[in-house]
Image (cartoon, grey):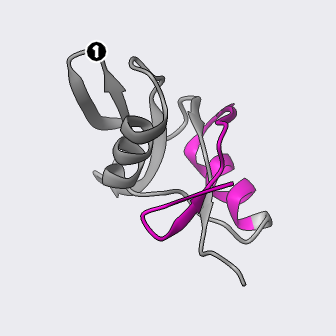
Amino acid sequence: MKLEMGLCFETSTRPAAGVAAAISTCESVDRWLPNIEQVVAFQEDNLAAPQPEEWTDTLYDNGTKVFAYTAQITVLGSEFGPKEAGQAHAYRCVALPSS
């Protein structure tokens, strides 16, 4: 885990999974998915571009399908956008720092 922006980030991504599985895995260890800005900032501060898309905590339901946003840094900057929730993407969990 690495302290960034007041949160502890897992330093490696977890294997690709659907967003529901990612959320469940993070919750099972008392953690959660970071938001779009946190994923981008962590990648920019710690990793070389380009990076794989990572799930974020941003979800929405259009009445037919559930989507979740992924975020990543690229050689041209950062990208984020909705993906179908069942698609498999890498992710990392975050937690509050403990004393």
User: In the figure, 51 relative to 20: above or below?
Assistant: above
9 lies left or right of 15? left
In screen coordinates, is 73 left or right of 26?
A: left
Amino acid type, callout 1: Val
| Residue 90 rendering spot, x and y as whole percentages | 59, 32
Q: Where, by quadrant of the figure, is residue 35 drawn?
A: bottom left
* Residue 21 visible here: yes
Based on the displayed image, in which of its 4 quarters is residue 28 positioned? bottom right
Position of 62 with respect to 87 (left or right) is left
Give the quadrant of the N terminus: bottom right
Q: Residue furthest bottom?
A: 99
Can residue 98 be found in the magenta stretch? no
- Magenta stretch, residue numbers: 1-27
- Image coordinates of residue 97 in percent, x first then y, are 63, 75
Q: Residue at x 56, y 45 (%)?
A: 19
Q: Position of residue 20 (x, y in %)?
A: 61, 51
Could you tell me which residue is drawn at 31 percent across and 52 percent down? 37
Q: Is residue 7 magenta?
A: yes
- The answer to which of 23 and 94 lies nearer the viewer is 94
**Secondary structure found at label 1:** loop
User: Whole-percent x and y of residue 70?
Assistant: 39, 38
Let me know if residue 66 appears in the view.
no
Q: Nearer the viewer, residue 4 or 76?
A: 4
Name the residue that disc number 1 marks: 75
Q: Residue at x 37, y 56 (%)?
A: 58
Quadrant placement of the C terminus: bottom right
Q: Judge the density around disc 1: few (<14), some (14-19), many (≥20) Cα neighbours within 10 Å.
A: few
